[in-house]
Image (cartoon, rainbow, N blue to C red):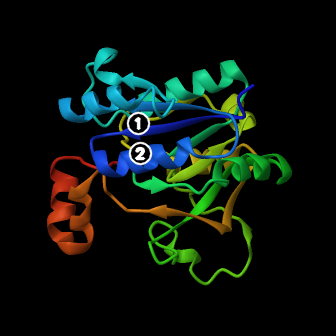
Amino acid sequence: MYEALVITPVKDSLNTTIETIKSIHQSEGNFLYCIYNDFSTEETTRHLEEIKAKYNFELINLSEITQTPSPNYRFVLQMAQKKALELNIPLIIVESDVEVKINTLKELNRYSKELGKCGMVAAITENYQGKINFPYLNFKSEKKAIVKTRHSLSFCCTLLTTELLQKYDFKTLSAEKHWYDVSISRKSVQLGLNNYLIVSMGVLHKPHSSRPWKQLKYENPIKYYFLKLTKRLDRI
């Protein structure tokens, strides 16, 4: 019996994706791991095909089942929700610029069962020096090991409980958006569930590795917001 469904949406960024895969492969526990390949290059797709048996993951190439151009996060979440509910297990999202520790997934699963009325529970993100980084910079001074929060939880490394998956149909997610961590975090609270951030349990995060254009937000914010508005990129 699987403890959870673990998914990683992938759009190229092959080097960081491989590190994510390796970290999940060595994790404690029995997890079903699925990679959702969102129209990556032929090189990335070929390499994922070559290593899927070695690292024991299921590869879903979205190019084989939809013509909708990337990003397809909504479609990925809908497919993952369906699979998790069929297996009656929680869903853990680990993005392709994150590396988990050996006990991260198991601990997220444990916390989700022990914390009251849990809808979502996330590991905090850190840089190579172990310092809290984006997107949880507002928790840098937090002293508590576990925080119940109304702030949106990122999907960097986050568990969605079966109760949340049963209560909130992802088919109702807006097709006008690209990313859904804010929407789902808010809906979890609206449904009477609690969202928790585990401040004492960090994962390595290498921000925007799969979307390097977003680095413009820090390097050239005028150009970033110009692209965001004119090309309708990064809709949250």
Q: Is residue 62 above or below residue 162?
A: above
Picture disc at residue 84: none
Of helix, strand and loop, which one carries label 2? Answer: loop
Q: Is residue 11 left or right of residue 91?
A: left
Q: Earlier in the sequence, mark 2 or mark 1?
A: 1
Residue at 67% from the left image edge and 35% from the top image edge? 4
Q: Quadrant of residue 92?
A: top right
Q: Secondary structure at mark 1?
A: helix
Q: Which residue is mark 1?
A: 73
Dot 2 amino acid type: Trp
Q: Position of residue 16 (x, y in %)?
A: 35, 52
Dots 2 and 1: beta carbons under 8 Å? yes
Type of amino acid at the residue the image marks with label 1 = Tyr
Q: Give the crowd class for mark 2: few <14, some 14-19, many >=20 residues within 10 Å.
A: many
Question: In the rendering, at what x and y percent does residue 115 appear?
Answer: 82, 54
Total numbered circles: 2
From the viewer's side, name the closer residue of 67 and 198.
198
In this view, 157 is above or below 36: below
Q: Which mark is residue 179?
A: 2
Q: Residue at x 64, y 45 (%)?
A: 159
User: Residue placed at 53% from the left, 76% from the top?
Assistant: 138
Mark 1 crowdedness (10 Å alpha carbons): few <14, some 14-19, many ≥20: some
- The answer to which image quadrant residue 87 occupies is top right
Asked if one can make out residue 41 in the rendered structure from this viewpoint, the answer is no
